[in-house]
Image (cartoon, rainbow, N blue to C red):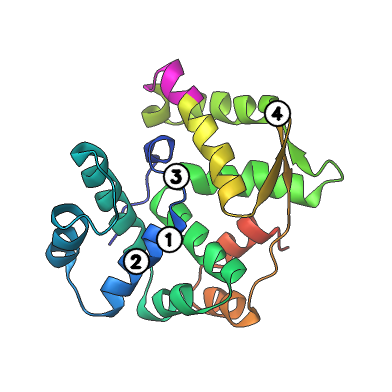
Amino acid sequence: MITKKSTSTIKKVPFNYLKSKMIAQMVIDGLDKTQIYEKCFVENKIQINSLDRRREITNELYRRISTLDLYLLKSFVSLDIITSKFILLYAIAKADNLFYEFLAETYREAILSDKKYISMDDFDKFFIAKKEKDLVVANWSLTTIELLGKGYRKMLVDSALGVRKLKNIYVTKMIIHPEINKYLEQIGDYKYVQAILGER
């Protein structure tokens, strides 16, 4: 069971779509955590030179992928790229409560409003509000918050949720396979559909 908590891992481990698909396929093929670590860290299947970075990315990507059941894993690997990216965003939001709250509060508001973009001020307002309410976030340094803001902006662009124009991120609504939308509603995770797709 993945504990939902606020983390700052996105500042160092961004979207990593292709590496995440590789690890998902390993899980589908029946490899356990130890075997996946052997493939990714020891054999360096994820092709990262730095040992520290390789360890960090292997552990975080596995943590994200672990939030997906077999149906979603197979859908992530096999469906169209937009639906696949959506499933990875869902996995990241499941593993990182602060990122989910950003999507639900700041990103969704931009999707549903006439504004259609997220400014630097919007990122600042989000993190300031969280520092006041979340004890974990309150203990993070200003540097950590700044790096996390950059990580979130990169996450939005890499995942196809947004397009960078100067300092703003213009949001783009994803159109995903309807069966995934329906499945997440069935398993009680429709709030992630609402956060990422701006559904009512």
Q: Residues within 10 Å of mark 1 (few under 14, many from 20)?
A: few
Instruction: Name the mark nearer the viewer: 3 or 1.
Output: 1
Name the quadrant of the N terminus: bottom left
Is 35 left or right of 131, judged from the image as shown?
Answer: left
| Residue linked to disc 4 | 167
Label 2 and label 1: CA atoms lie apart by 6 Å
Residue 14 is labelled as 3
Q: Is residue 25 above or below residue 12?
A: below
Label 4 and label 3: CA atoms lie apart by 19 Å
- The local secondary structure at tag 1 comes to helix
Comparing 180 with 165, the one in front is: 165
Question: Residue, x 42% and y 48% (percent of image)?
Answer: 96
Of the two numbered discs 4 and 3 on the same chain, state the one appearing first in sequence.
3
| Residue linked to disc 1 | 18
Q: Amino acid at mark 2?
A: Met
- The local secondary structure at tag 2 comes to helix
Q: Amino acid at mark 4?
A: Lys
Highlighted range, magenta:
139-146
How would you classify the magenta stretch by its main secondary structure?
Answer: helix
Of the two numbered discs 1 and 4 on the same chain, state the one appearing first in sequence.
1
Is 50 left or right of 115, judged from the image as shown?
Answer: left
Label 3 and label 1: CA atoms lie apart by 12 Å
Q: Position of residue 91 (x, y in %)?
A: 44, 60
For the residues labelled 2 and 1, say whether their Cβ atoms are less than 8 Å apart.
yes
Q: Amino acid at mark 1?
A: Leu
- Per the image, is 89 magenta? no
Q: Amino acid at mark 3?
A: Pro
Of the two numbered discs 4 and 2 on the same chain, state the one appearing first in sequence.
2
